[in-house]
Image (cartoon, helix red, strand yellow):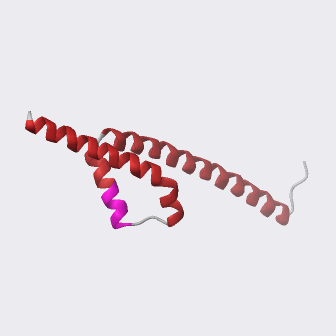
Amino acid sequence: MARKNPNEQIAAAREMLARAQARQRQVDTRVKIVTGALALGWLRKDPRAARAFLAHIQANPVRDQDAELLAELFTELRAIILTAQQQSQANHVS
């Protein structure tokens, strides 16, 4: 096999770098998906975590397009918090 000239070596190195960067983006995306799934599970099970999350979002608003995407989740979390509050009040009354 003939040795590559410097320009070919540079091009090959750039291709290798591009492939490595693409693999890293795939890993980063997968980490975000798994982390998000874990966080959602936690928020749905722990009303205190849900309350803290919503307070954080209120103090640090997301972009309008993200808020629209997350509106259903925010509604769900508010319902979880409300249900927990009602159960707590019922337990204190009993």
**Magenta residues, dominant SS class:** helix
In the image, residue 21 lies at what x, y percent? Answer: 65, 55
Q: In the rendered picture of this protein, how many numbered marks are placed on residues?
A: 0
| Magenta stretch encompasses residue 65 | no
Work out whether residue 94 or residue 20 is closer to the camera in this orientation and state it: 94
Residue name at image x 55 percent, y 45 percent: 30
Horizontally, is 77 left or right of 91 in the view?
right
| Vertical order, 58 against 87 (above or below) | below
Image quarter for residue 14? Answer: bottom right
In the image, residue 54 lies at what x, y percent? Answer: 34, 56
Horizontally, is 56 left or right of 29 in the view?
left
Work out whether residue 69 or residue 46 is closer to the camera in this orientation and state it: 69
In the image, residue 26 lies at what x, y percent? Answer: 61, 48
Residue name at image x 76 percent, y 56 percent: 15
Horizontally, is 54 left or right of 28 in the view?
left
In the image, residue 27 lies at what x, y percent? Answer: 57, 47
In the picture as drawn, the residue positioned furthest to the right comes out as 2
Work out whether residue 89 or residue 22 is closer to the camera in this orientation and state it: 89
Residue numbers of the magenta segment = 54-60
Q: Quadrant of the C terminus?
A: top left
Residue name at image x 30 percent, y 59 percent: 55
| Magenta stretch encompasses residue 56 | yes
| Vertical order, 65 against 81 (above or below) | below
Image quarter for residue 44? Answer: top left
Residue name at image x 36 percent, y 47 percent: 77
